[in-house]
Amino acid sequence: MAANTDTALKEAMTTIEGTIGVALVDYNSGMALGVLGGGKDLDLTVAAAGNTDVVRAKARAMEMLGIKDEIEDILITLGTQYHLIRLLRGRGKNGLFLYLALDKGRANLAMARHQLRGIEAGLEI
C-alpha cells in the first residue's frame, strides 16, 4: 500500500514506540517537507536543517575515504534520546531522508529501524 508524506509521518508517529517527532527532509535544501510531533524541546524544522549538515558531512567523509557504498541510516545517541536519520532510495526519493527522534527509555532501536524501513518502502513522493 502506497503512502503519501502525511500518512507516512502519522504511521511513524503512532506505530513506532517512543517516537517524539518525525520529519521528511530534503537534504539538498535542508527544508523539511513534512513534520509531525516535536514541540518546544524539539523544533523539527531546526533539526531538519541541522541534520542535513550531518548527512552532507558523512557523505564527504565517505568520498574522502573512497568508500563506494550507500548510507542506509545514521544513528545519533543522546543521553535520553535516539535520533535516527534514514536516507531514502528509489524513484523520486533520492536527496530525501526520514528523521526520527525517539525517547531512549521507551524505544526499541532495532524495531524502530525495522519499522522505519517499512514506512520508507511504502512512501510515494
Image (cartoon, grey):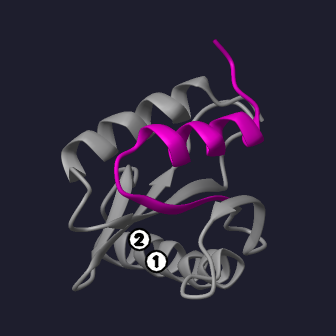
Type of amino acid under label 2: Glu
Q: Is residue 32 magenta?
A: no
Q: Are marks 1 and 2 in contact (CB under 8 Å)?
A: yes
Residue range (magenta): 1-24
Q: In screen coordinates, is 5 left or right of 123?
A: right
Is residue 124 shown above or below 30? above
Asked which secondary structure carries label 1, the reply is: helix
Q: Which residue is mark 2?
A: 63
Numbered tag placed on residue 60 in the rendering: 1
Q: Residues within 10 Å of mark 2 (few under 14, many from 20)?
A: few
Type of amino acid under label 1: Arg
Q: In screen coordinates, is 20 left or right of 72?
A: right
Percent across and percent down for residue 125 are 78, 35
Percent across and percent down for residue 76 are 31, 75
Could you say which is closer to the camera, residue 76 or residue 52? 76
Please report the residue visible at 47 percent of the width from the left and 81 percent of the height from the top. 57
Q: CA distance from mark 1 to mark 2?
A: 5 Å
